[in-house]
Amino acid sequence: MPRVLRIINRFNLGGITYNVTYLTKYMAPEYETMLIGGPNEESEESSLFIPQKLGLNPIVIPEMRRSVNPVNDLKAYRKIKQIIREFKPDIVHTHASKAGALGRRAAYKCGVPVIVHTFHGHVFHSYFGKTKTALVKKIERSLAKKSDAIIAISEKQKLELTAEHQICPPEKVHVIPLGFDLDRFRTDQEIKRRNFRSAYAIADDEIAIVIIGRIVPVKNHEMFLRVIHRLLETTSKKVRAFIVGDGESRYDLEMKAREMGFDVATEKMTVKKPLTFTSWIRDVDRVLAGSDIVCLTSWNEGTPVSIIEAQAANKPVISTKVGGVENIVRDGESAFLVEPGDEEGFLNRLAALVDNEDLRKKMGLPGWETVGSKYHYTRLVKDMSSLYRTLLRK
């Protein structure tokens, strides 16, 4: 039985943990897999409950942190090499940037037969300045040469990695979309809706608009605030906005909201407010059941999980046209897409959905058909198994 060492950046709540968990659990018995990764940051919710719920016990490397730290990175690198020597994997598969940098170098140094890396997103724009971005690209090109296969999670991302940023040649890149347990977004929706709306005192005639994800600059939550602020000034409908998640920019965003005149509630407050910061909520299926419209305002994305899950729950979506978003929605049917930073376009489409209940229902209907089979974890496991077999034969 071939052995796979799967390495994740860190165990923080998000789509990557779900994907590596499903691959670790369900590629058995064809493959024996060990899952390792770094811990979540202080501003993040731990995601270790996800693999543990399926009976998995990942190894956490405390030194493998998000930020660059030569001392910690060297310690993490040495620990990965030691694990490789003891586990003797046939394949080392890394997921996201830090895991890719340390894991691929360690695997190459130890002579692992097959090295695979998945780009769940990239930092080639909207993250750093010009000089640092150029350095990151140079490092990724070097690491790609040490990799037997690169996985992109959308066709758009493959074009970015090959034609736009020239990280590696097209023949090295395999497109394997993400996969999730989407069935939970279809079950007990009415019960979950009542539960969420009761918890936040959302009346039946109020429209709940949510944005889900890390509160960091690249997600451009400030645009969401500005759009909601303008919407509340113009619409006659009763609207509630919810920012679901947490991150390094949480405090600054709350201050910005108050400066704009928002009456803000946090997860510690049960009073009814037009804008609520909920922090992390593990059962996001309850959030989506209770919401009416799902937004995404990012400058850069890989394949945003919240948009896949929103469609699985048959909710209409408004998103910026970034990363692989256009590959996971039907523009004009299950979602409205606008260019990054297009505040006016975003507001106009959001207002149209807020003011028209029939349009919300119409755009929610194609969601499950759009993502139900294409982004299920059973398809993910099947595609990955096939790629591994091909690489091992070579």
Image (cartoon, helix red, strand yellow):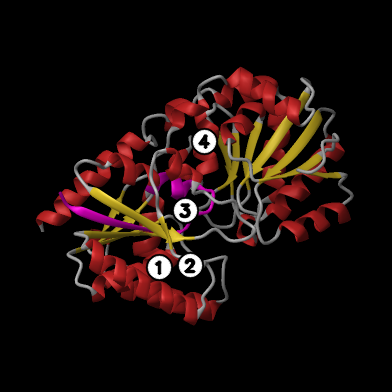
> Which residue is at a point 48% across and 76% down the rendered structure image?
72
In screen coordinates, is 158 left or right of 303?
A: left
Q: Which residues are magenta?
A: 1-20
131 to the left or right of 289: left
Estimate how packed mark 2 is, as few (under 14), some (14 to 19) or many (20 or more) residues with alpha carbons within 10 Å: many
Q: Earlier in the sequence, mark 3 or mark 4?
A: 3
What percent of the width, then of the height, locates residue 34?
31, 54
Question: In front: mark 2 or mark 1?
Answer: 2
Pointer 2: what residue? Answer: 124
Q: Are marks 2 and 1 in contact (CB under 8 Å)?
A: yes
Q: What is the distance, in whole Å, between disc 3 and disc 1 at their CAs?
A: 14 Å
Please state if 391 lies on the left or on the right of 135 as rendered.
left
Q: Secondary structure at mark 2?
A: loop
* Residue 126 higher or lower than 136, as above or below: above
Q: Which mark is residue 309?
A: 4
Q: Report helix, strand or loop for mark 4.
A: helix
Earlier sequence position, callout 3 versus callout 1: 1
Disc 2 from disc 1: Cα separation: 8 Å
For marks 2 and 1, the one nearer the N-term is 2
Q: In what element is the residue under mark 3? A: loop
Q: Are marks 3 and 2 in contact (CB under 8 Å)?
A: no
Residue of label 3: 302
Q: Distance from label 3 to label 2 (Cα)?
A: 11 Å
Amino acid type, label 1: His
Apparent side of residue 5 relative to residue 316 in the rendered image (left or right): left
Badge 3 amino acid: Gly
Cβ–Cβ under 8 Å for marks 4 and 2: no
Query: Label 1: which residue?
Result: 165
Task: Check residue 257 for magenta coloring.
Answer: no
